[in-house]
Amino acid sequence: MLFRSVADEIRSSVYRELGITASIGVSYSKIVAKLGSDYRKPNGTTVIRRDNLKGMVWPLPAKDLFFVGPATNQKLQKHGIITIGDIANAGSAMLRSLLGKNGETIWEYANGLDTSLVVDKPSPIKSIGNRATYPRDLYIADEIKAGFWVLSEAVARRLRLHEFKAQTVSIYIRDKHLNSCERQMKVRRPTQLAHEIMETALALFNANRNFLSGAPVRSLGIKGMNLQAANKYTQLSFLPEEMKRQKWEAIELAMDEVRERIGHFAIQRGSLMLDAIGKINPFDDHTIHPVPYQ
């Protein structure tokens, strides 16, 4: 088969030039090819055709399917849905009632119905953010604030790296019982400053804390949305508040340079140094950025 030969040649070239193995999936859609790439790790080519989809893909565990994360997999298991074949046979309407639009999407994927195109250039960035699950549940206000600080610094650094400012800040909250919610708020001025992102995130959290019924927090996330170019024209101001803001921008740029040269933990906020939360590096880990337009 021509496509298998091409895939094998790619694997051989990767090993020859880089000294590492690669697994490749070959199929009629991106999502099925992705499943194939995981099928024979660490070094194999897997071809999945329409006529062998059920035999090869359906016996795989549901968690192997794209978009089925731990929380979704847990919900599926409670309804006796264990394999990808179970998802395919559960019915689109049933899964939509259980998981919303995501349920319909994974039903299509399980049946090999992905029709998205392969593109040769990245889509415009829609949002930039980070999400992290912490080493322990967060109970008190200072712990929540510390959690938001490490995320805000990472998001602000990413915004500067991609030369954006965010006009909206969105937060994600998940408690220890896996209940979750997302909220967002428009900021007064487009920003790429960590303290402004953190303060907005904390205000959003405090305004919606009742949603979680006081349960300890397991995960937090922050996204900068409604992005605009950082070099977009803005009127200069000599007001003390704006001049202070410009100084903070210079300080955070300097922090970026130090971390780029020496490492993330070369410079830290004092309030984070004595807590395990401060040992998280969201800029290199826990990444959910950038999110392109679909």
Image (cartoon, rainbow, N blue to C red):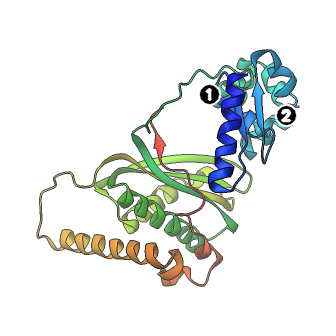
Residue 60: image tag: 2
Residue in the picture at 80% in, 35% down: 62
Residue in the picture at 44% in, 76% down: 261
Q: Residues within 10 Å of mark 1 (few under 14, many from 20)?
A: few
Residue in the picture at 35% in, 72% down: 252
Q: Amino acid at mark 2?
A: Leu
Decide if residue 229 is on the left or right side of residue 174: left
- Between 79 and 28, the one lying in front of the other is 28
Q: Is residue 170 above or below residue 40?
A: below
| Residue 248 in picture, x, y percent from top left | 30, 73
- Between 46 and 63, the one lying in front of the other is 46
Q: Residues within 10 Å of mark 2 (few under 14, many from 20)?
A: some
Q: Amino acid at mark 1?
A: Lys
CB under 8 Å between discs 1 and 2: no
Residue 128 seen in the current view:
yes
Residue under label 1, please give it: 101
Residue in the picture at 54% in, 72% down: 146
Of the two numbered discs 1 and 2 on the same chain, state the one appearing first in sequence.
2
Decide if residue 142 is on the left or right side of residue 199: right
